[in-house]
Image (cartoon, helix red, strand yellow):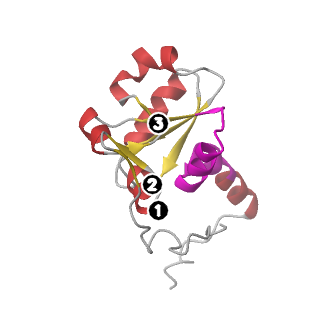
Amino acid sequence: MSAVTGVPAADSAAALAHFAARLAFETDVSDVAADLDAAEPALAVVDSRSRESWDQGHIAGALHLPTTEIAARATALIPRDVTVVTYCWGPGCNGATRAALEFAKLGYQVKEMLGGFEYWAREGFPVETAEGITRRPVDALTAPVSGVACAC
């Protein structure tokens, strides 16, 4: 029995609904980087990690708003007419999901950034610390090292 087809794939209508819904809830680090580079005004990127994690490094231009503070502080900091993108450490952490849930409860349009801060840094995007902005070398396991976009 096939490990892949032992459970049959969904029919195309169900697959269409599923994958379209995922794209409505999720984005990735390169799309966020492109929008930040373009100074997209309808976007607010939110780091939901602790102060210690934020200080260790974060996305330049992101807003630090730990999940436990979203309900109390979000409406004073983030306009209602933007799409909020939440991130946390990485794919092994569901902190961005919890933060996105809090924004949804407040009525915001929200997406979770897949890969989190880990993949942001591993793909060589700018990381801000108290010392300034740095970039790590691109990890060949996460992005093309030639600098050319993967075009996916």
Residue type, numbered disc 2:
Trp
Q: Nearer the viewer, residue 86 or 52?
A: 52
* Residue at 40% across, 55% down: 91
Q: Main secondary structure of the magenta part?
A: helix
Specify the segment rendered in magenta: 20-43
Asked if the magenta segment contains residue 9, the reply would be no
User: Residue 84 location in percent, x, y?
Assistant: 56, 33
Rendering quarter of residue 59? top left
- Determine which residue is flagged by label 1: 123
User: Residue 16 location in percent, x, y?
Assistant: 72, 56
Q: In the rendered view, would you say 32 is above or below 66? A: below
Residue type, numbered disc 1:
Glu
Mark pair 1, 2: CA separation: 5 Å
Q: Residues within 10 Å of mark 1 (few under 14, many from 20)?
A: many
Q: Earlier in the sequence, mark 2 or mark 3?
A: 3
Local secondary structure at mark 3: loop
Rendering quarter of residue 14? bottom right
- Determine which residue is flagged by label 3: 62
Q: Residues within 10 Å of mark 2 (few under 14, many from 20)?
A: many
Local secondary structure at mark 2: helix
Check the image and name the residue furthest to the front: 131
Name the disc covering residue 82, or none.
none
